[in-house]
Amino acid sequence: MTAQLIDGNALSKQLRIQVAARTLALKAKGVTPGLAVVLVGDNPASQVYVRNKVKACEDAGLHSVLEKYEANMTEADLLARVEGLNQDPGIHGILVQLPLPAHMDAQKVIEAISPAKDVDGFHIASAGALMTGMPGFWPCTPYGCMKMLESIGYDLKGKHAVVIGRSNIVGKPMALMLLQKNATVTICHSATPDLKAMTLQADVIVVAVGKRNVLTADMVKPGAVVLDVGMNRNDEGKLCGDVDFDGVKEVASYITPVPGGVGPMTITMLLVNTLEAAETAAN
Ligand code: GUN
């Protein structure tokens, strides 16, 4: 059996058309959704990410500003800038690109963002809202994964979902979202003794480790749905995920490719969160 692809580019295109339409409607009421992207330092990967985020905003009709600062900016200056954006009525979403330079406390900077503008969903108030099922912004990558499952009409109720990886940005929020949809959830990580024994029981597997070939065909129950959050380079320098795609696609029922899978969905959900922040501010 060969798995069906869940195409993140195609799904993103559909969702971004809806974002553009809602943005137009909001603009007609005199409100243009605005995202501020703050980049400190010159991390090359971060520069690519922020450029893609700003371009996606422009393409969907949202207003965006990219603020770039030198790596030697003080934490106090960055906190003051975040507070300025908190007070700016034209800005509905604030994203401080991570990683920050080592002399800064990233969590302190994130906590300085107003929860009403925390479109990354990284603020402790957003994490608490997700945990308790209250309204709040969901982190974009796991939120995008949920949209991918929704796009194939997958009902999580009673299913066993295994999440590999326990980061605050993907693994932990992913587990909470799956739980909220009534899946039985197992979180696996580097200290899990027998990963294969866990994944073989899974109906849905989300892999978010940041290492190639974490999941191979022999670890997957036939018909399972596999979502690959990884973004790595193989020996030839080509982009690849955490999943051995060629092997696993012969066992799974659905699988996300890398590139063109979860990646574009992350930016799409950032647009959705920013639009919703603006809609809430307008009402
Ligand atoms: N660095 C890598 N991914 C992300 C993300 O989704 N948001 C922010 N702010 N920084 C990141």
Image (cartoon, grey):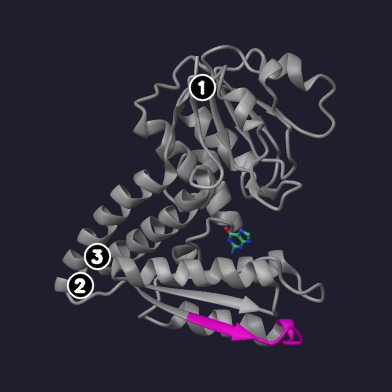
Residue at the disc numbered 1: 183
Ligand 1 shown in quarter: bottom right
Mark 1 element type? loop
Residue at the disc numbered 2: 27
Residue at the disc numbered 3: 23
* Callouts 2 and 3 close, C-beta under 8 Å: yes
What residue is drawn where x is 36% and y is 80%?
89
Name the amino acid, label 2. Answer: Lys
Q: Position of residue 155 (x, y in %)?
A: 40, 21
Disc 2 within 8 angstroms of ligand 1 (CB): no
Q: Is residue 139 above or below residue 107?
A: above
Horizontal arrangement in the rendering, residue 263 relative to residue 26 (left or right)? right
What residue is drawn where x is 64% and y is 80%?
79
Name the amino acid, label 1. Answer: Ala
Q: Is residue 23 above or below residue 196?
A: below
Range covered by the magenta-colored residues = 66-75
